[in-house]
Amino acid sequence: MKRVLFIILLIIILAIGGLLFSPLSPLPGGALTGEIVEEPVNDWSFAEDERICHFEMNPPDPYSITVTCIVHEGQLYVGCRSCPSKGWHDYINTDPNARYRVLGKVYNVTAVRVTDPEEVNRVWAARIAKDGSEPEPAPEDYWVFHLTSR
Protein backbone atom coordinates (compact mmCIF):
# COMPACT_ATOMS: atom_id res chain seq x y z
CA MET A 1 0.00 0.00 0.00
CA LYS A 2 2.84 2.40 0.85
CA ARG A 3 4.45 1.65 -2.50
CA VAL A 4 1.23 2.48 -4.38
CA LEU A 5 0.87 5.76 -2.49
CA PHE A 6 4.51 6.59 -3.22
CA ILE A 7 4.01 5.94 -6.95
CA ILE A 8 0.84 8.07 -7.02
CA LEU A 9 2.61 10.90 -5.19
CA LEU A 10 5.56 10.67 -7.58
CA ILE A 11 3.23 10.87 -10.62
CA ILE A 12 1.50 13.93 -9.15
CA ILE A 13 4.83 15.66 -8.47
CA LEU A 14 6.06 14.92 -12.02
CA ALA A 15 2.80 16.17 -13.53
CA ILE A 16 2.93 19.41 -11.56
CA GLY A 17 6.59 19.90 -12.51
CA GLY A 18 5.71 19.35 -16.16
CA LEU A 19 2.96 21.94 -15.96
CA LEU A 20 5.23 24.49 -14.33
CA PHE A 21 8.16 24.17 -16.67
CA SER A 22 6.82 23.24 -20.08
CA PRO A 23 3.69 24.19 -21.95
CA LEU A 24 1.09 21.47 -21.93
CA SER A 25 -1.74 22.49 -24.19
CA PRO A 26 -3.83 24.36 -23.23
CA LEU A 27 -1.77 25.35 -20.17
CA PRO A 28 1.28 27.62 -20.50
CA GLY A 29 4.69 26.74 -19.11
CA GLY A 30 8.02 28.36 -18.35
CA ALA A 31 11.42 28.16 -20.03
CA LEU A 32 11.69 25.68 -22.89
CA THR A 33 14.11 22.80 -22.56
CA GLY A 34 15.97 21.00 -25.29
CA GLU A 35 19.12 21.28 -27.36
CA ILE A 36 19.78 24.95 -28.13
CA VAL A 37 20.71 25.67 -31.74
CA GLU A 38 23.01 28.69 -32.04
CA GLU A 39 23.29 28.81 -35.84
CA PRO A 40 20.77 31.08 -37.59
CA VAL A 41 18.07 29.41 -39.67
CA ASN A 42 17.09 30.94 -43.00
CA ASP A 43 14.85 28.13 -44.23
CA TRP A 44 12.44 26.49 -41.77
CA SER A 45 11.14 23.95 -44.29
CA PHE A 46 12.51 21.11 -42.14
CA ALA A 47 9.69 21.86 -39.65
CA GLU A 48 6.91 22.04 -42.25
CA ASP A 49 5.44 18.63 -41.42
CA GLU A 50 5.38 19.21 -37.67
CA ARG A 51 1.96 19.94 -36.19
CA ILE A 52 2.73 21.09 -32.65
CA CYS A 53 5.59 23.32 -31.52
CA HIS A 54 6.34 25.49 -28.50
CA PHE A 55 6.85 29.23 -28.36
CA GLU A 56 8.51 31.01 -25.43
CA MET A 57 8.47 34.74 -24.82
CA ASN A 58 9.23 37.21 -21.99
CA PRO A 59 12.92 36.37 -21.38
CA PRO A 60 13.05 37.84 -17.82
CA ASP A 61 10.28 35.45 -16.68
CA PRO A 62 9.84 32.86 -19.46
CA TYR A 63 6.28 32.12 -20.55
CA SER A 64 5.73 29.38 -23.11
CA ILE A 65 2.72 28.14 -25.05
CA THR A 66 1.89 25.29 -27.39
CA VAL A 67 1.26 26.47 -30.95
CA THR A 68 0.57 25.04 -34.38
CA CYS A 69 3.76 24.98 -36.44
CA ILE A 70 3.27 27.15 -39.50
CA VAL A 71 5.94 27.20 -42.17
CA HIS A 72 5.12 28.99 -45.42
CA GLU A 73 7.65 29.27 -48.24
CA GLY A 74 10.44 28.42 -45.79
CA GLN A 75 9.45 31.17 -43.36
CA LEU A 76 8.31 30.49 -39.78
CA TYR A 77 5.12 31.92 -38.27
CA VAL A 78 3.04 31.70 -35.13
CA GLY A 79 -0.69 32.35 -35.44
CA CYS A 80 -3.01 33.53 -32.72
CA ARG A 81 -6.77 33.02 -33.10
CA SER A 82 -8.94 35.37 -30.98
CA CYS A 83 -5.67 37.12 -30.24
CA PRO A 84 -7.07 40.40 -28.90
CA SER A 85 -8.60 38.43 -26.01
CA LYS A 86 -5.30 36.70 -25.14
CA GLY A 87 -2.53 38.34 -23.17
CA TRP A 88 0.59 36.60 -24.43
CA HIS A 89 1.01 38.92 -27.43
CA ASP A 90 1.74 41.74 -24.95
CA TYR A 91 5.04 40.01 -24.15
CA ILE A 92 6.02 40.30 -27.82
CA ASN A 93 5.07 43.98 -27.88
CA THR A 94 7.33 44.56 -24.88
CA ASP A 95 10.27 42.41 -26.04
CA PRO A 96 10.33 40.66 -29.44
CA ASN A 97 13.10 38.26 -28.34
CA ALA A 98 11.65 34.78 -28.06
CA ARG A 99 12.50 31.10 -28.43
CA TYR A 100 10.88 28.40 -30.53
CA ARG A 101 11.09 24.64 -29.97
CA VAL A 102 10.50 22.19 -32.78
CA LEU A 103 11.73 18.60 -33.13
CA GLY A 104 13.28 18.80 -29.65
CA LYS A 105 15.56 21.71 -30.53
CA VAL A 106 15.27 25.30 -29.26
CA TYR A 107 15.94 28.26 -31.55
CA ASN A 108 16.43 31.92 -30.60
CA VAL A 109 14.05 34.03 -32.67
CA THR A 110 12.67 37.53 -33.03
CA ALA A 111 8.88 37.80 -33.31
CA VAL A 112 7.23 40.59 -35.30
CA ARG A 113 3.50 40.93 -35.88
CA VAL A 114 2.48 40.73 -39.53
CA THR A 115 0.05 43.50 -40.45
CA ASP A 116 -0.16 42.98 -44.23
CA PRO A 117 -3.59 41.35 -44.80
CA GLU A 118 -2.36 39.43 -47.85
CA GLU A 119 0.49 37.84 -45.90
CA VAL A 120 -1.86 37.06 -42.98
CA ASN A 121 -4.21 35.30 -45.41
CA ARG A 122 -1.35 33.31 -46.99
CA VAL A 123 -0.22 32.12 -43.55
CA TRP A 124 -3.83 31.33 -42.57
CA ALA A 125 -4.23 29.30 -45.79
CA ALA A 126 -1.04 27.35 -44.98
CA ARG A 127 -2.34 26.69 -41.46
CA ILE A 128 -5.76 25.42 -42.47
CA ALA A 129 -4.31 23.35 -45.32
CA LYS A 130 -2.45 21.40 -42.61
CA ASP A 131 -5.80 20.57 -41.04
CA GLY A 132 -7.29 19.58 -44.40
CA SER A 133 -9.91 22.34 -44.12
CA GLU A 134 -11.38 24.26 -47.03
CA PRO A 135 -9.63 27.54 -47.92
CA GLU A 136 -11.25 30.66 -46.52
CA PRO A 137 -10.10 34.17 -45.55
CA ALA A 138 -8.43 34.60 -42.18
CA PRO A 139 -10.76 35.64 -39.36
CA GLU A 140 -10.51 39.30 -38.29
CA ASP A 141 -9.22 38.27 -34.86
CA TYR A 142 -6.42 36.08 -36.30
CA TRP A 143 -3.00 37.61 -35.76
CA VAL A 144 0.24 36.34 -37.24
CA PHE A 145 3.77 36.74 -35.94
CA HIS A 146 6.77 36.19 -38.24
CA LEU A 147 9.70 34.53 -36.46
CA THR A 148 13.26 35.04 -37.67
CA SER A 149 16.51 33.67 -36.28
CA ARG A 150 18.64 35.90 -34.11
Image (cartoon, rainbow, N blue to C red):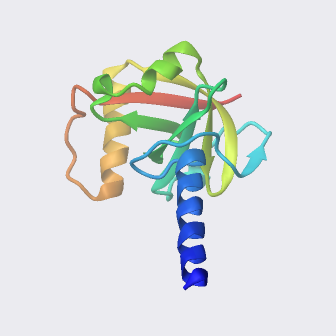
Which residue sits furthest bottom?
1
- Residue 72 can be seen, yes or no: no
Locate residue 133, reporting x and y percent. 23, 54
Classify residue 120 by image quadrant.
top left
- Residue extending furthest toward the right: 38
Q: Residue at x 64, y 31 (%)?
A: 109
In the rendered view, would you say 140 is above or below 6? Answer: above
Q: List the single residue furthest toward the top.
A: 94
Q: Position of residue 24 (x, y in %)?
A: 47, 52
Q: Nearer the viewer, residue 26 or 19?
A: 19
Q: Please state the total of marks drawn on the protein image.
A: 0
Residue at 54% x, 43% y is 29
Instruction: Answer with left or right where residue 27 lies relative to residue 129.
Output: right
* Quadrant assignment for the N terminus: bottom right
Q: Where is residue 149 drawn, in percent x and y?
A: 67, 32
Q: Position of residue 74 (x, y in %)?
A: 55, 42
Using the rendered view, name the quadrant where residue 117 is placed: top left
Write the residue at 46% across / 28% down: 145
Q: Residue at x 60, y 74 (%)?
A: 6
Locate the C terminus and report the quarter of the image it occupies. Answer: top right
| Vertical comparison of 35 with 29: above or below | below
Left or right: where 46 falls relative to 34: left
Left or right position of 105 against 92:
right
Taking the image as drawn, is residue 93 in sight?
yes
